[in-house]
Amino acid sequence: MVVGMQSNLKVMAKERVRTLPPLNIEKIKKCIEGYSYVSFDIFDTLLKRTVEKPSHIFYLAAEEFKKRTGQVILDYETMRSKAEIHARAVLDDKKSKAGQESPIHSEEITLTDIYRQINGLTVQDKEILMQIEYDLELQLCCENKDMKKLFEWCLENNKKVLCISDIYLPASLIEEMLTKCGYTAYDRLYLSSLTGFKKSTGSLFLHVLKSLKISEKELVHIGDSFQSDYLAANKLGIKSVLVPNKINQLSRDVVSDVSPKDKLAYQILQAMINCTMPSEQDEYYRFGYETFGILLHHFNRWLKKDLEKRNISKIFFFSRDGKIMKAAFDTMYPESGLKEHYICVSRRSLRVPQLWFQSDLNSIVYGFPAAKYITMETFLINIGLEPDKYMKELKECGLTLSTVVKRSEISASESLVAFYGKIKPDMVANSRKEYDSLLRYLKANDFYGEVAVVDIGWRGSLQYFLQQITEQAGIPVNMHGYYISLSKDAKWDLDIQGYVGNDAGKNGCMVWKPFVGLAETLFMALEGSAKKYTCSDANHTIEPILYPFEYVKNGKLLPEALHVKAIQEGAISYINTLKHYPTLTELTVSSLSAFAKIIAVGNTPNRKELNMFANFQFLDEKVTYLAKPAKLKFYLTAPKQLKQDLWSSRWKVGFLKRLLHLPFNYVKLYKVLSSLKE
């Protein structure tokens, strides 16, 4: 009974170590300031491995072995783990058989001992695998930022710093790992693989005391293992400080939501994110690092692979959503050899130049942004004319700028048809002028031949407009569209693909629909939308004219813009960090798995995420919000207002959750309400 209680207490203590809050470095400093010698455990204390667990390195080793040799080793992770167990059993057996006359003093095995126990592989294959494991251990280690601060404080305060570990890896590797992570000024290195003594038995601590000729009262030890670092040191009278071996910095765990075939790769990537999370940054930066970066990285891998397959060398990222996509691409492939362009285009800048050759009213309305109702002011803006200049014509037709018309009934409105007849010559003249400027802009950017166009997606409208214009102008261009996702009503007669979703991304937008505004927000560029193009008087170059950026007030960025900036910086930081671990950059997960955390935030937001994003403004003809409902009490007496607010919300799941505050499946509720609306 007592043994069972002790066992349970150990398990509880270990679990507590795993779940301790972030380190209180100042508290530890006070605890150790009176000691001359400070020893640090190495793994999970000074160093972290950027994998979920050490055995994942064996999985990665098998993948690298396959790449180098073409050979597949089935379940190598288990094979390698069992070999270590067998090697320890062999050592124990040798020690028990050696007896008192010729005792074996070593308590530790080596990496070579482990590989001797792997059967079914040639000596040469084992040597290759052992070198791969060595290289991966070095590549996939990183500093523990909190412990490094404590390590450096000890040096600054003239303490003798020791590094100590129970490990089978060779001293040469451990020294390289410590050096890589900036631990170079320690006094001595004590390893079980080097000395034959182990912390867990206490013999390595005794060896340290003996070699330094100090008493146990002069040494304090810091480590993460309850047994090997805390209990073993305490039993010898050595002061020990127990620190957590894992601090969870991730906002969400969605491993259970990803495809089974993706789980291992996803776990490893999440472990890397957790180990390297820039905890000093704000919550938006960390959101980008944890959630957005993996989507951008995998999208661009998919894009690059298909470009190579099709032998396409020109790539055009559309403004504004394409700006962060290009930044990620350039970060990943700084020497891609591709001719990359960022071109300023918008529905307005491409729609107006084609009105002169598609001037019937139905065609014009078809190209308008999707909206059930529009004002006459919006109608004029959409066809490229200044509303204030047509007050007389409006009055003659019984209209005003604020007159609202149903989009589907525009061509049936006698007054609107009459008004259009009056302004059509001006529209055509302006359209032709903008058309000529656009062609010069495309020519200046070498928009011809086999080209890829990249954007966030949905319907592929910009690609469609460009195709209409280039065909009219006789420009020999063949466009291949690459999008994050596409809707069911996308222009599928074009050459287009969506990353998120099945069957070339068809209807992948359904994944985003309950939170489309939230998803779009992540891609927002900090610049205005393209209006049209003009020739610069100074150097006769053609340049885009941009609308003022919506999220600037009195010369300063609004909070929404600052938050998106931080998110995007975090995403790029993730991509830059990943480059330090080349093996991890090759891990592949499906598009839905790469998108999993954004889906989780969009469909099941927690209170923190709602507070972060729900009040984001959208500044169009009127101000709308991602998810900002009024009080439920108000809507009980104003159901029409509830309907209007819900369907104008850009994050409907977030809107419903903020409104109701109930544990409910809001995606299902949204789908039911959508079906009733239709």
Image (tube, helix red, strand yellow):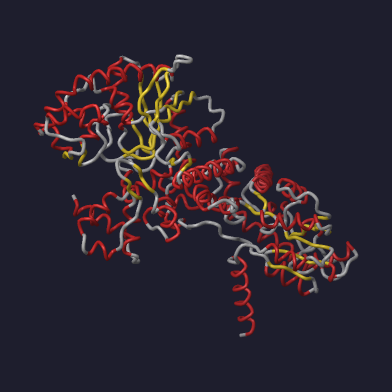
The N terminus appears in which quarter of the rendering?
Answer: bottom right
Between 196 and 376, which is closer to the camera in this rendering?
376
Between 598 and 193, which is closer to the camera in this rendering?
598
Q: Is residue 58 visible?
A: no
Between 422 and 440, which is closer to the camera in this rendering?
422
Q: Is residue 321 left or right of residue 250?
A: left
In the image, residue 588 sits, relative to residue 44, either above or below, namely above
Between 547 and 366, which is closer to the camera in this rendering?
547
Residue 31 lies in what quarter of the image? bottom right
Q: Looking at the image, which residue is at 16% across and 26% down?
A: 420
In the image, residue 111 sits, relative to residue 492, either above or below, namely below
In the image, residue 486 sits, relative to residue 207, either above or below, namely above
Picture coordinates of residue 440 (x, y %)? 38, 16
Residue most extreme to the bottom:
1
Residue most extreme to the right:
213
Q: Looking at the image, which residue is at 49% across and 23% down?
A: 339
Q: Is residue 335 left or right of residue 353?
A: right
Q: Looking at the image, which residue is at 20% across and 56% down?
A: 640
Q: How many marks?
A: 0
Picture coordinates of residue 675 (x, y %)? 21, 53
Q: Is residue 164 visible?
A: yes
Picture coordinates of residue 327 (x, y %)? 50, 35
Picture coordinates of residue 624 (x, y %)? 32, 48
